[in-house]
Image (cartoon, rainbow, N blue to C red):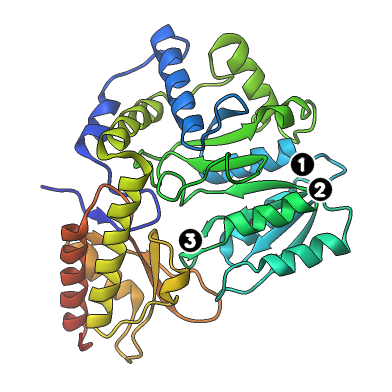
Amino acid sequence: MRDALLLTPGPLTTSLTTKTAMLRDWGSWDADFNAMTARVCRRLVSLIDGEGEYTCVPLQGSGTFAVEAAIGTLVPREGKLLVLANGAYGHRMARLTAVMGRDVEVLDVGETSPVDPARVDAALRADKRITHVGVIHCETSTGILNPLSDVARVVNTHRRRLIVDAMSSFGALAISAREIDFDAVIASANKCLEGVPGMGFVLARQSSLMQAEGRAHSLSLDLHDQWCYLERTGQWRFTPPTHVVAALAQALDQFDAEGGQPARLARYQANCHALQEGLRAMGLQPFLPERWQAPIIVTVHAPAHPAWDFGDFYRRTKARGVVLYPGKLTTVETFRVGCIGAIDSSDIDAALDAMRRSLADMGIPA
């Protein structure tokens, strides 16, 4: 029996080959495992064209662990972070920055539009204390795509440093250090790389990491210490997620075999197009206009029908083999459907059929 389709922003549906890679046990200090970690890290750096200037620092835990580690290590204790927020994950970045005691300001542009570079420019002109800017590349509370290149140009013009949360875009949407100036890109194994949860990573400029000794607010989230130890010994400081690393190594092999980032993006775009067309055919309206929609996750307006109940809809679609995701907006009721993972447009068609049947069972015309 096939596992349910996880149409979420991660964890997501993975291939059988990726799952099978976790059947072997690895010693955390074993030379073979260390070599695999090194290969994975080199491959991740190459995905941003960062060879020679950037390094990969892997970290145990979810993507949020890696975001907190990056900010806590790269932003000086006397520095200030400007967070560009248009959804839940921007606000989470700001919250974790405040919790660790760093000065933080939020430029909130609302949930319905991308970040405006002109407003970033104005904010940086107004406050010379800002040392770093944090941006979410793809804000998965809506699926909105922020204009990373334009934001980076503004930040670079003001000679501030950029930290990019690329959690749900990395591997599908191109990010090149040859074209975009940033201090760090943060992502995790279980999104567009189609690995499994348990490992985040920070692709950081080496010169910035070298300046960061002693800044971290946490021993376990100290990227500088993790990097130095890895460089010196080839090992993780603390028990690594061995099976997760093995799964990611296999997922990266599949990524290459598929044709790399352009092919991954093309498949997700086809998924997204099929999903949006199918939703509209059922009378369901996507939240975002197409020009702002990243091919990662689609936020959908809930049906304006008295029988609508997301919990009931979720249970019915799950019984048909499809797992959806609740909405995360504060102003309107929505639900979300992911386009990413080891799926193609035929899986999207199957998911649409499950949604259509579930709505019919609820008495909602579709």
* Three-letter amino acid code at the position of disc 3: Thr
Q: Residue 151: percent from the left, percent from the top? A: 65, 58
Q: Compute the Cα span from label 2 to label 1.
A: 8 Å
Q: Which mark is residue 140?
A: 3
Q: Is residue 276 visible?
A: yes
Location of residue 266 with respect to 308 vertically, above or below: above
Residue at the spot 77% in from the left edge and 52% down from the top edge: 157
Q: Compute the Cα span from label 2 to label 3.
A: 26 Å
* Residue, far front: 179
Q: Is residue 93 visible?
A: no
- Please tell me whether mark 1 sits on a helix, a strand or a loop: loop
Front residue of this view, candidates 119 and 149: 149
Residue at the spot 50% in from the left edge and 48% down from the top edge: 167
Q: Which residue is mark 2?
A: 131
Instruction: Tell me whether circle 2 and circle 1 mark residues in contact (CB < 8 Å).
Output: yes
Q: Which mark is residue 75?
A: 1
Front residue of this view, candidates 192 and 305: 192
Asked which quadrant contains residue 227, the reply is: top right
Q: Residue 250: percent from the left, percent from the top? A: 30, 29
Tell me if 342 is positioned left or right of 68 in this view: left
Residue at the spot 49% in from the left edge and 81% down from the top edge: 332
Q: Earlier in the sequence, mark 2 or mark 3?
A: 2
